[in-house]
Image (tube, helix red, strand yellow):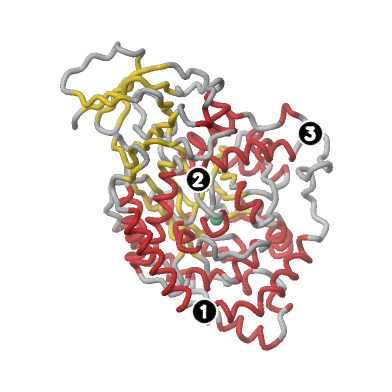
């Protein structure tokens, strides 16, 4: 492959403090050298002038859902997690394989446009994952040119059989209807997931399969254990949503007699290939368990705020030695895919979680989490830093953009001021996927037409499901609110109610 020499840019190095002008030599998708300007001499090299550009590692999204792309704008204002879940069938229903690809493509386009080069995607298909469906998702990412870890998201309980007491709290006619919603037996999901893992034919440097048992309460113990075994068998990573809402944590205590994390540990499913999305309602023992098992946690501040789920104890997780990543969660509950916003929120939310500035997340900690931390959780090494022998996933920011005028402190301005608007180009695996503000590999106007046509058709097809979900909405909401109001042993991270450390 031809070598590329990027000249004239400032380069944010792995120490996150050096940001001097440098030339970057790229070969075969890898960074071969970063040297002061003019020092690398090569013939037959493609020279790229990057004057007025700041080069930073591509952001790595530790938790998203490609199926959320077509669900943008479909989640009402002021809706907590469980109410959203009660209507998710109406948002994700009736989709063809082509619709699944389209949703993943749309998600990938927004990720790239906002500076993300790799993502961990838990993609749902109902009632079980399919080889064609997950292949369509992989095609969506491939079309855009992104790296991704794609995990079929699976459950063998419905919301109504998952949450103890919810079914009984419904009036009889709704109980009857809730019982008609069926989840597939876990053996069927595992068999399909095994086929997906064993027949994966994509280049694993770019696209990898994984497993996504959706939420512990929504999965039987046998299912969770089978996922962990299959992950070991196929050497893939596993991710699930852990203690995302307070209702989940309270109902977990009720169902298991111990915390969600203690339960997962007792099942023997925690380990270095396991990661927990959200991880909000954790106590000190949970955090120690996660750290001891080598589990990664992905902080998703945007959807945690949108759904009112809470604030993850990011400082306590870092102090315990837990690998911390940052994610956006789905476009339906986060209203987009912006890893720059996620970083800024992670930095700023830590300041309302604690009055002690020493315990706030620094911009270095946030940026490391959004790059190297997430990359480790995806299972990729040599990713998330601009250094020789690392993958050439690079975001080119225009330092002439108002976000950087004046440019005084690149890392701080990157984390606390950038919103994606200054992105000029994005390179993944040594190839431009976005250049000069234009996507190189697909026609965005055509994508828009396809998305609008699909959404019009799907909204009409799902109107019945939406109407059928409506009577459950307030009942689910009140049930979960009653549990969220229950006394709970986790209070340390609430503002003004933190136990002394
Ligand atoms: Zn999620």
- Which is in the foreground here, disc 1 or disc 3? 1
Element type where label 3 sits in the image = loop
Tag 3 residue: 355
Residue at point 71%, 63% (across, down): 251
Within-10-Å neighbours for mark 2: few <14, some 14–19, many 20+: many
- The part of the image, by quadrant, that contains residue 123 is bottom left
Measure the alpha-carbon separation of dots 1 and 3. 47 Å
Measure the alpha-carbon separation of dots 2 and 3. 28 Å
Within-10-Å neighbours for mark 1: few <14, some 14–19, many 20+: some
Q: Is residue 140 visible?
A: yes
Check mark 2 vs ligand 1: CB closer than 8 Å? yes or no. no
Element type where label 2 sits in the image = strand
- Asked if residue 91 lies left or right of residue 42, the reply is right
The x, y position of residue 145, in whole percent, is 32, 46
The x, y position of residue 438, in whole percent, is 34, 43
Report the disc number at residue 463. 1
Furthest-left residue in view?
Answer: 44
Asked if disc 2 and disc 1 are in contact, CB closer than 8 Å, the reply is no
Residue at point 40%, 17% (across, down): 21
Quarter of the image with the N terminus in it: top left
Q: Is residue 194 visible?
A: no
Tag 2 residue: 62
Count of labels shown? 3
Q: Earlier in the sequence, mark 2 or mark 3?
A: 2
Within-10-Å neighbours for mark 3: few <14, some 14–19, many 20+: few
Q: Earlier in the sequence, mark 1 or mark 3?
A: 3
Q: Answer with the quadrant where ligand 1 appears in the image.
A: bottom right
- Asked if residue 409 lies left or right of residue 477, the reply is left
- The part of the image, by quadrant, that contains residue 347 is top right
The x, y position of residue 151, in whole percent, is 43, 56
Q: Earlier in the sequence, mark 2 or mark 1?
A: 2
Report the disc number at residue 416. none
């Amino acid at each position: 492959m031809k070598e590329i020499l990027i000249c004239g840019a400032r380069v944010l190095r792995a120490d996150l403090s050096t940001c001097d002008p440098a030339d970057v030599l790229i070969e075969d998708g890898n960074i071969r050298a970063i040297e002061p300007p003019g020092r690398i001499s090569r013939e037959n090299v493609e020279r790229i002038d990057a004057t007025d550009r700041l080069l930073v590692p591509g952001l790595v999204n530790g938790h998203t859902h490609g199926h959320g792309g077509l669900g943008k704008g479909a989640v009402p204002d002021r809706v907590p997690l469980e109410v959203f879940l009660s209507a998710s069938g109406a948002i994700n229903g009736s989709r063809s394989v082509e619709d699944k690809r389209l949703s993943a493509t749309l998600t990938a386009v927004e990720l790239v446009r906002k500076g993300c080069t790799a993502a961990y995607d838990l993609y749902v298909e109902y009632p079980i994952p399919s080889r064609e469906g997950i292949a369509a998702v992989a095609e969506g990412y491939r079309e855009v040119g992104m790296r991704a870890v794609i995990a079929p998201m699976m459950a063998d309980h419905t919301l109504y059989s998952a949450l103890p007491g919810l079914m009984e709290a419904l009036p009889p006619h709704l109980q009857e209807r809730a019982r008609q919603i069926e989840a597939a037996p876990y053996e069927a999901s595992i068999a399909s997931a095994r086929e997906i893992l064993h027949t994966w034919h994509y280049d694993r440097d770019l696209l990898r399969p994984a497993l996504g048992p959706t939420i512990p309460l929504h999965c039987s113990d046998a299912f969770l254990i089978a996922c962990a075994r299959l992950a070991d068998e196929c050497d893939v990573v596993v991710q699930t949503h852990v203690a995302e809402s307070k209702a989940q944590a309270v109902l977990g205590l009720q169902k298991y007699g111990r915390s969600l994390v203690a339960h997962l540990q007792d099942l023997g499913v925690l380990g270095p290939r396991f990661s927990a999305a959200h991880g909000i309602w954790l106590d000190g023992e949970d955090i120690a368990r996660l750290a001891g098992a080598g589990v990664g946690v992905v902080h998703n501040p945007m959807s945690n705020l949108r759904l009112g789920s809470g604030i993850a104890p990011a400082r306590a997780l870092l102090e315990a030695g837990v690998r911390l990543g940052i994610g956006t969660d789905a476009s339906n509950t986060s209203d987009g895919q912006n890893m720059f916003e996620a970083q800024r929120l992670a930095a700023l939310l830590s300041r309302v979680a604690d009055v002690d500035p020493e315990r706030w997340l620094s911009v270095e900690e946030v940026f490391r989490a959004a790059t190297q931390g997430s990359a480790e959780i995806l299972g990729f090494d040599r990713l998330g830093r601009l250094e020789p022998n690392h993958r050439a996933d690079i975001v080119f920011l225009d330092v002439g953009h108002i976000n950087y005028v004046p440019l005084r402190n690149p890392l701080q301005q990157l984390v606390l001021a950038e919103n994606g608007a200054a992105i000029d180009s994005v390179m993944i695996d040594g190839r431009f996927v976005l250049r000069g503000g234009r996507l190189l590999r697909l026609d965005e106007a055509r994508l828009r037409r396809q998305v609008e046509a699909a959404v019009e058709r799907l909204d009409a097809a799902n109107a019945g499901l939406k109407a059928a979900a409506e009577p459950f909405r307030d009942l689910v909401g009140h049930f979960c609110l009653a549990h969220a109001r229950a006394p709970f042993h986790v209070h340390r991270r609430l503002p003004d109610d933190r136990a002394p450390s």
